[in-house]
Amino acid sequence: MRVYYAEYNSPIGPITLITTDKGLCFVQFGNVSDVLPVAEKWRSKHSLRGTLIEDCVALSDVIQQLDEYFSGKREKMEVTFELFGTPFQRRVWHALEHIPYGETRSYKEIAAAAGSQKAVRAVGSANNKNPLSIFIPCHRVIGSNGKLVGYGGGLDKKIALLRLEGAWG
């Protein structure tokens, strides 16, 4: 199996992208040199074998969609994913995909959408393990009180993404 990676220079900082022949599987804020060690641990945990190959062409559609998103021309990402996670995590990530652009939902609302109304903390954990930032929009999840609560990329990036989408002051 081949596994491709590229670094995308977004308006809010570098983003490392990783895809297999089956689909996008890992997106994390940070430059390649900082993210690849984390990605290697993630790949090992999920038994994702194959040689890592730097290749912007393999990720050209993903990069184009990010360009369109950051320029305000795209509201919905249309990328094939190869997801690795528990059944519960996948249910949460699927619920996140249904949060419309420019809107937010609470952790409690996502727990209900994932079929586990009382699993609010577990939803937070699944959000934290979301391997596809921006594409699976965990940045659209806020606290029940309307306040921002954690984001793997940092609250500054969460605010920037929500502002880009018109969902935050």
Image (tube, rainbow, N blue to C red):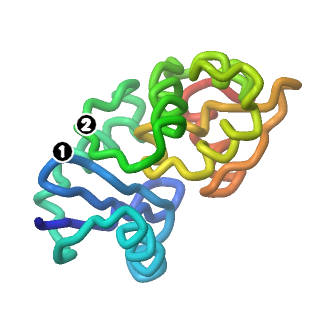
> Is residue 74 found left or right of 107 in the rendered image?
left
Q: How many marks?
A: 2
Bin the neighbour count of mark 1 within 10 Å (Cα to Cα): few under 14, some 14-19, many 20 and up: few
What residue is disc 2 on?
Answer: 79
Occupied quadrant, residue 41: bottom left
Q: Amino acid at mark 1?
A: Asp
Relative to residue 86, is residue 47 depicted above or below? below
Q: Which mark is residue 152?
A: none
Q: Which mark is residue 61?
A: 1
- Rendered residue at 67%/50% (across/down): 151
> Is residue 62 found left or right of 103 in the rendered image?
left
Q: Tell me whether circle 2 and circle 1 mark residues in contact (CB < 8 Å).
A: yes
Question: What is the x, y in percent for residue 65?
Answer: 28, 39
Bin the neighbour count of mark 2 within 10 Å (Cα to Cα): few under 14, some 14-19, many 20 and up: few
> Is residue 118 found left or right of 47 in the rendered image?
right
Question: What is the x, y in percent for residue 68?
Answer: 32, 37
Q: Amino acid at mark 2?
A: Val
